[in-house]
Image: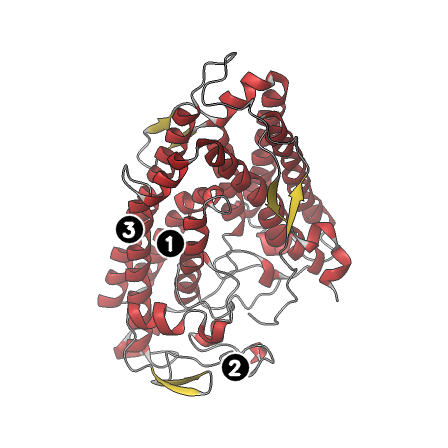
Amino acid sequence: MLFPAPRALHFAATVATCAMSGAFTLQPASADTDVKAVLATYADIALAKYEDSLTTAKALDAAVDALIVSPSAEALGSAKAAWLAARVPYQQTEAYRFGNAIVDNWEGRVNAWPLDEGLIDYVDATYGTESDDNGLYTANVIANAQVTINGQPVDASAITPEFLSETLHEAGEIEANVATGYHAIEFLLWGQDLNGTGAGAGKRPHTDFDAANCTGGNCERRAQYLAAASDLLIADLEEMVANWTADGAARKTLNDDPKAGVAAILTGLGSLSYGELAGERMKLGLLLHDPEEEHDCFSDNTHNSHLYDAVGIRNVYKGRYQRIDGSVVEGASLADLVGEKDADLDAELNAKLDKTVAAMEVIAARAESGEAYDQLIDEGNDEGNVLVQAAIDALVDQTRSIERAVAALELGAIAFERSDSLDDPGAVFQ
């Protein structure tokens, strides 16, 4: 991160909906959809998404191993391609956040951002040397076999998955000390993106992993860190896969209270749509015109991360997910439940979900044609700003229909994630 940017505050706000009533039953008299069948589809899709995320993480791990054994530009390129492929199924899982505590409590280990990359490795001089908020801002654990955490010396001689997860990740209880997950791996593969809002992603050379022709110093420890982070990602995803199996804790929680399970689905959809994606990941960066506020900032892959978040929201609502092998998981859906209560609302929400995905596809097409997301949010890029704002508007609009779905299903009050970027933009600059 070149220049730490102010962060908008997250806070929960209650969505006004109809009061809870006994009208919502497992099998409404006037409808055919079994709520338990909807929850089963929801869980089956979660399992499939996390299994696909695990499969692609294992492919990434194999590519990382190949890079470490025989560093070359081609091997680094293969590892980068594997990382990009791994993001496709994982981003679609984010619709399971917010409503499922077991996912939200785990998610920070695999997808936390933004990170103070000086904690991990060398950084450019423009990054600075210290931060008032983070004593580990430039700790550079790859270069140092001992670091100081909370005033105490800590042995960092062995860079292992356990060290990363139990000692370094969020060290000092500082969220920016991201030591694990996709974005730590992304930084190690690409390095810093020093282009600002200009063209280009990070340009880490493969020789940063080549002990015989080392650039950047500490190549063996950098390789150890990358290998440990990759192994840990697999272990974390294996844990989440287990949570969604037939006897898994996440699936069991849904079945314990079907009505609460449906509320969990809608909480995830509304919170990701509004506070997280429209607000923290998109509007904040657009307000600040800050490339450090893009989700995949080292690789310039943010357009795909946003697109697949939107796709994930849609496939949860529709109860249909196409796996990476081309097979399809589908069944009774939230759309079925909403349609039985209000067919017009279901048609409205389906149309809005499609509109959001289409807006994200326009951004992605622009990025694939050479104008990356950080360039689209640049100050003065009026056309790019309009494209990003259109996607934000679509997300906000679909959230209004998700609120109406909550009311139609008579679920009571549900708290969606909020963002100052949308609710109080002036606070972002304070």
Q: Is residue 46 above or below residue 214?
A: above
Is 422 or 301 nearer to us in this picture?
A: 422
Left or right: 116 as drawn, with respect to 403: left
Please identify the residue farthest to the front as the structure is shown. Answer: 22
Q: Amino acid at mark 1?
A: Trp
**Camera sees residue 2:** yes
Q: Is residue 255 above or below residue 184?
A: above
Of mark 2 and mark 1, the one earlier in the sequence is 1
**Camera sees residue 70:** no
Left or right: 208 as drawn, with respect to 357: left
Residue name at image x 33 percent, y 74 percent: 222
Residue 83: which disc?
Answer: 1
Residue name at image x 28 percent, y 77 percent: 220
The percent coordinates of residue 9 (x first, y second) are 65, 60
**Residues under labels 2 and 1: Cα distance?**
30 Å
Q: Which residue is mark 3?
A: 238
Q: Amino acid at mark 2?
A: Gly
Residue 203: which disc?
Answer: none
Q: Which residue is mark 2?
A: 135
Q: Amino acid at mark 3?
A: Glu
Residue name at image x 42 percent, y 49 percent: 103
Quick one: SS at disc 1? helix
Is 13 or 187 nearer to us in this picture?
A: 13
